[in-house]
Amino acid sequence: MIQKLQLLNLIIYIIIAFIISIILLLISIILNKKTKKFNNKLISYETGCLPTSDNQIKLNIHFYIIAIIFLILDIEIVLMFP
């Protein structure tokens, strides 16, 4: 009897968590539609002039991997000193 009650509580908890996550997702979608009207805010600022080129630099994934490895090893070394 106790196991069935625990299972029922778990199912109710999962359903409530799912409903709350769906509600939050819908609220964020509704609020995001209101902010898409202002496309001027998405343009980068270059000394008051319109941008002359695409500012999104495409970097190779290799640079990100090296940066993550560096951060991991750097934190590891800092924690080893004390």
Image: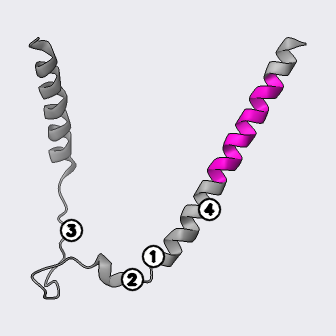
Q: Give above or below for 9 relative to 50.
A: above
Gap between marks 3 and 1 measured at Cα: 22 Å
* Residue at left offset 58%, top offset 70%: 30
Q: Give above or below for 15 relative to 28.
A: above
The overriding secondary structure of the stretch rendered in magenta is helix
Q: Are marks 4 and 2 in contact (CB under 8 Å)?
A: no
| Residue at disc 2, secondary structure | loop
Q: Give above or below for 10 relative to 48.
A: above
Residue at image mark 3 = 56
Mark 2 or 3, which is nearer the eye? Answer: 2
| Residue at disc 1, secondary structure | helix
Quadrant of res 43? bottom left
The residue stretch that appears in magenta: 7-22
Residue 75 % position (x, y): 16, 26
Gap between marks 4 and 3 measured at Cα: 30 Å
Residue 26 is marked as: 4
> In the rendered structure, which disc, 3 or 1, sits on the residue that comes first in sequence?
1
Q: Quadrant of the C terminus?
A: top left
> Disc 2 residue type?
Phe
Residue 38 is marked as: 2
Residue at image mark 1 = 35
Q: Is residue 8 left or right of residue 57?
A: right
